[in-house]
Image (tube, rainbow, N blue to C red):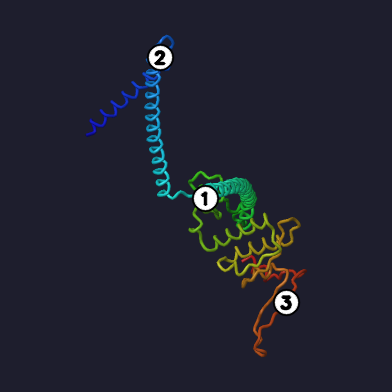
Amino acid sequence: MADGDEQAAAEGTFEGEAANNALTELEHFEYTGLSGDVAELCASRRAEVSKATSSEAEQAFSARLEEMQKDVSDRVSALGRLAPNLKAHEQYESLKKQESAMATEADETKKKLKALQEEFSGVREERSNRILDAFNAVSGKIDAIYKALTKSAAHPLGGTAYLTLEDDGTGSDEPHKGGCKYTAMPPTKRFRDMDQLSGGERTVAALALLFAIHAYQPSPFFVLDEVDAALDGENVTRVAKYIRSQSSAKDASAFQSIVISLKDAFYENANSLVGVTRDNERRTSRCYTFNLDGVEPTAAGAGAAGA
């Protein structure tokens, strides 16, 4: 069926082309010199061919027009089924404005982040510098203070104390991350960890560290509550004399102290005493104050202090 239609279409096309060729020949044919009957016949034939050709052209145009109309109709139907968003352009413009605003905000945020990173780097550098300054100052003072607290007639050089910065193992350039190790060696003692020292030795080491920190950042006064509890008489006397010497010093390391103690050595080296006792009659506590400035120690007191 399809082959027959194609053959018919081919035959129609051939006939149309033959008619067009014949019409072209008639249009360029010279009628002069022909007889009247022949000329009339040619003109008649020419009109018939022209009419046939015009009719075929109209039919072809009509068919092509119908085909185009159908194609347009199909496309319109397809668009209708797709349900296009007619406000897509408006939405695009709105999203474009939002994107521009977000890009601007992102740039501002990046600038703020950069400024904060620079500020943080400055703070971190300042922190490291302050830690190193404090460490170097305390480390430079602690050995001399520890020697002053531990030297005696039998050991005039005293002990040794020093601070070291520990490595945290990460290669960080921040000194505080690895921590700080404190080492104290009393006279005639070999190196030991701090937790292997006796209670009195740890107390003296702790006081040396406290006084070294004070030398870097002086405070108005100390309150020492029974720091001598683990000390023997000789160490109590040395600590009391050191505190008394510092209270009368004229440089920045001088300090005042309030010592709560039950040891006589502290009483003998104090500038003043404040005693608290119970008043049985009033059933309350009473305070007594004694100013010891200008009072020389008695022989018995000196002997007790020496013991």
Q: Amino acid at mark 2?
A: Gly
Q: Are marks 3 and 2 in contact (CB under 8 Å)?
A: no
Closer to the eye: label 2 or 1: 2
Closer to the eye: label 3 or 1: 1
When the figure is inspected, residue 273 is found, relative to residue 105, above or below; the finding is below
Q: The C terminus is located in which quarter?
A: bottom right
When the figure is inspected, residue 37 is found, relative to residue 213, above or below; the finding is above
Of 67 and 28, nearer the camera is 28
Residue 300 location in percent, x, y? 67, 71
Gap in Å between the C-alphas at discs 3 and 1? 94 Å
**Residue topped by disc 2:** 36
Question: Which residue is rendered at x = 74% and y = 58% of the image?
Answer: 249
Q: Dot 1 lies on which element?
A: loop
Q: Amino acid at mark 3?
A: Thr
Badge 2 density bin: few <14, some 14–19, many ≥20, Cα 10 Å: few
**Residue topped by disc 3:** 289
Q: Which mark is residue 97?
A: none
